[in-house]
Amino acid sequence: MAAPSPSTAAVRVTRGHSFDLVMSQQLDDLVTRADLDGLVRLIDATCASRDWAHLLEIRAASRQAVQTGRQLWPAATLAEYRLALHSPAAIATQVLRLEASRFTLGPLTEVIAQHHTWDQLAEFLPHEPQSTYVAYECALRGNEIANANELFPALEIPVQSSSWEPQYQLAVYADNEAAFAAPTLPPTSEATTCDISAVDAVTASLIDNESVEQAAHQLAEAWTAQSNGHCTTAFASGEISNALGALGDLQTTNVNLRALSSQDALRWLAWAGASGGAYGRRRGAATGRFGAWWMLAALGDALRSWPLTAEQAGNIAAQWSWSWWDNEPSSGWQLQLVAHNATTNTSWAINASDAR
């Protein structure tokens, strides 16, 4: 990958001098008045005309306005988001900075992968962690990542998904909104009932496993630390009723179970790890997939062997029988998985949720 991206001048559309003056004066006037609504309208018009060089100017002027006490960062953020989403690769890559995604609909490393391929982006990206996240996001969208071993080592899992992995749930970004749909579940007509009336946190054969506990809480961290969510998890010897009963906050004696494949379960784990929940900052599909792999490693007592090979991770996922559990209609953001490992006769359950 080439280190520097081209300058604005190298990629801007040729415009007449008088047109440039009018556009620059309009931008100066809006910034001077701190007119956010006007800047948003200007951004919309600039995107419609595909004048990406001018959109870079709007972004720069809005960011620099803070030096004079004008809080125009929302306009700068919107301009960066639109550039990452729509502009040519040579320009889009110029807005990838750690702080740029703080108030956008999603991380720009994920946004940029929606309409750009890795082949288009790679030559403009430096050898740094942000570029690696872009590569992983592109791979999740079906791109082949050439020379993956040359990526900055920011994520310690294979960049290309393996055959045992699911088609992960991906965000869909539009100009002013984004959709983060949850995976689908089997119909409730396929549910079975699990009686947990005889089990609670005292009677369950709990296993003290700090690695599993931490991996689960890290997966739902955006929900719990940045939003209104909570996360409870239990690891126990024996059947899944032990793990479910040990959760301690279900206030029910019967739980409905819907069987999931290991691919279904991994899709749910990765979706939760990618999500920001109701008010948290979205972390992106690449981070969500990493969190799901880390959760597998913790459940398989394999963190000492980290990083896992694809074969190791696939074997761990296949050792567990997975189900979605619930006892009432869900709303908001939910992660309610339970799993049993017949080889070790252990069970694990998680109850994580967030709501507006």
Image: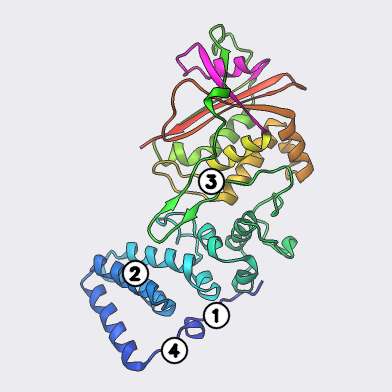
Residue depicted at x 36% and y 69%:
63
Q: Which mark is residue 6?
A: 1
Pointer 4 local density, CA inside 10 Å: few below 14, some 14–19, many at least 20: few
Q: CA distance from mark 4 to mark 1?
A: 16 Å
Image marks 4 and 3: residues in contact by CB distance under 8 Å = no
Upstream in the sequence, badge 4 or badge 2? Answer: 4
Region in magenta: 236-261
**Sequence-first tag of 4 and 1:** 1
Q: Nearer the viewer, mark 1 or mark 2?
A: 2
| Residue 16 locus on image (x, y percent) | 37, 92
Please identify the residue farthest to the front as the structure is shown: 189
Circle 2 residue? 44
Task: Determine the CA span between mark 1 and mark 2.
Answer: 24 Å
Q: Is residue 244 magenta?
A: yes
- Kindly report which numbered mark, 4 or 1, lies closer to the viewer in this rendering: 4
Amino acid of disc 4: Thr
